[in-house]
Amino acid sequence: MRKNPFDFGLLFLLPGLIGFVIFFIWPFIISLGYSFVESLRFPMDKPIDSVFVGFKNYLDLFKNESYLMSLRNTLIFMGICVPLNIVLSLLAAVMINKVSRYKEIFVLIFLIPLVIPSGSMIFFWKALFATDGYLNYILSLFSISEVNWLESEITRYVIVFIFIWKNLGYNIVLFVAGINNIPKLYYEAATVDGAGAVKSFFDITLSNLIPTFVLVTIMSIINSFKVFKEIYLLTGSYPHESIYMLQHFMNNMFYSLNYPKLTTATSILVLIITILSQALLKYERRKSV
Amino acid sequence: MRAKIFDIVIISILTLLSAIFLFPLLVTVTNSFMPSSEIITNYTSKLSIFDVLNGIAKKFINIKLLPGTLTASQYKEVLIDQPSYLLLMINSLKITVPVVIGNVLVSLLSAYGFTIWRWKYKEAVFLVYIIVMLMPLQAVLVPNYIVADMLGIKDSYLAIILPGIFSPFGTFLLRQTMKAVPCEYFEAAKMDGDNDFKILLNIIIPQMKSGLAALAMLVFIEYWNIVEQVVIFVKDYYKEPLSVFLSRISQDNISIVFAASCVYMFLPFYFLMIGQKNLEKGIELSGIK
């Protein structure tokens, strides 16, 4: 490793890096500036007439109830989705590996929801989950009273279901490959040492899957943000409180042209994600050495 | 014998799960062959005069797996009678194709750059890529908007396409995939006196075909499914891609919504069918270090 960054590597990286800086980093730095000013004349491209207010926007944001609600909901949603997706896809991957003859067809089936555009499914989800929808019809057959699937506390779990439906396949592929990469020798050695199936699952399978876990977590976080598309198409800009997400808040700030609030929220999110990704990569490095 | 029974249990569980996963898709496909009158009876819960006469007080939406009569009339309406539909599909292609081509090229060069770059702080630069990759779309909308405004491309597809080309996910995915190419290949080529560009062309690219195909597919799916950016950057409705239009059609014109959905998901579905192996392999390789 050298101190001087200039070599052929940089040359190859340069076209991408320039675009990345122009379209993401540089405007982000500019927008970071918005989070420290207040102006009566937003919207505008440059906040002329603006007053530097230090961390006031940040302090205000932490008193803003809809922001706090959206942050809390996003964290709760991720806290449910990411681990649930990991556990379910790992279970499915283990099962698929046990019946490896049918591996291809099962993996294909679980991958299909990933490629279906959200717009194509919205009508179906609505027909299923509406108050006069099919699910309530089935409940009514058992004389169970209607459930308000799309506008109550339950909505969160409806979205979790859609998230799992859409994203299970990607993780299954990663786990199936990860499990297949563990040398069979390890298991044989463990059996000789008298370890049972459960013990070798925890000692060998899980501990050898750590790089996969890190990647699966990264992908699940990305995708748990992306499920906003479904939330938005199903429930609009102002959904039930339990699924009012950070993205709703940001969207609504964007439309009301409240850039200081929006960029302040973004900066805080960048901070959270930086800490999170650092922790993930540190964990991976420590475990894989 | 016990192993056999165990297999059967696993296969049954997986088959049941598959059925749940496929159900939404199946309904969409079969119902696209339903006559519009049947759709309207099934998917609206308004009581008709006959229902009232029959003493039915409440009606539910009824999802039927099989149509009573088979007809292609929905498809005729979508594909022939309403040419606007195909025009909007061309809009989708105009956004998606440049992003896919551009992003795959840029990501390949960047990933290779990151692989051979020998600067001390390159992992810190890469961490910035990961952080931006983990951000939800809404957080990068303001940066995107600022740049689009400065470049004067706010009202053109370029405002969506250019950030798409430089979005960091591809670099991340391909760099992971490149780690799977054995080091000996690099060294052997270096010994032969090949320069970095030749190594990329003759050794890396052939080794990474599935990684590249997987990235192309994932980017295609994402931009085929584009919603949020369009709402911000595209103001004329005839310039909208199909994804946005489709969410509107599901309110106004439910009698053709299933065929419209099917036409829309055909391309990504087709790519999955011809590229399942590559997609899986590409995702797999990204998980192996």
Image: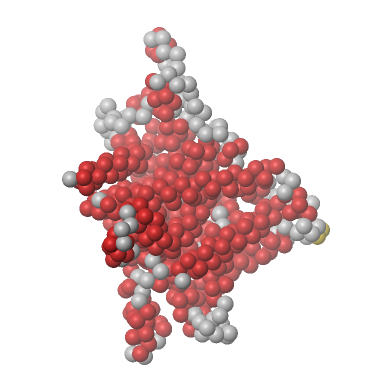
Residue A24 screen position, x and y as percent: 59, 64
Residue B93 screen position, x and y as percent: 41, 55
Residue A12 in the image: above or below residue B209:
below
Q: Residue at x 61, y 37 (%)?
A: A241
Q: Is residue B274 visible?
A: yes
Residue B281 left/right relative to A54: left
Residue A191 screen position, x and y as percent: 29, 59
Pick the front one: A61 or B162: A61
Q: Residue at x 29, y 54 (%)?
A: A97
Pick the front one: B211 or B246: B211
In the displayed orientation, state which residue is furthest to the front. A194
Residue B65 in the image: above or below residue A258:
above
Q: Residue at x 31, y 32 (%)?
A: B65
Q: Is residue B88 visible?
A: no
Residue B11 screen position, x and y as percent: 26, 44
In the displayed orientation, state which residue is furthest to the left. B1
Q: Residue at x 27, y 27 (%)?
A: B68
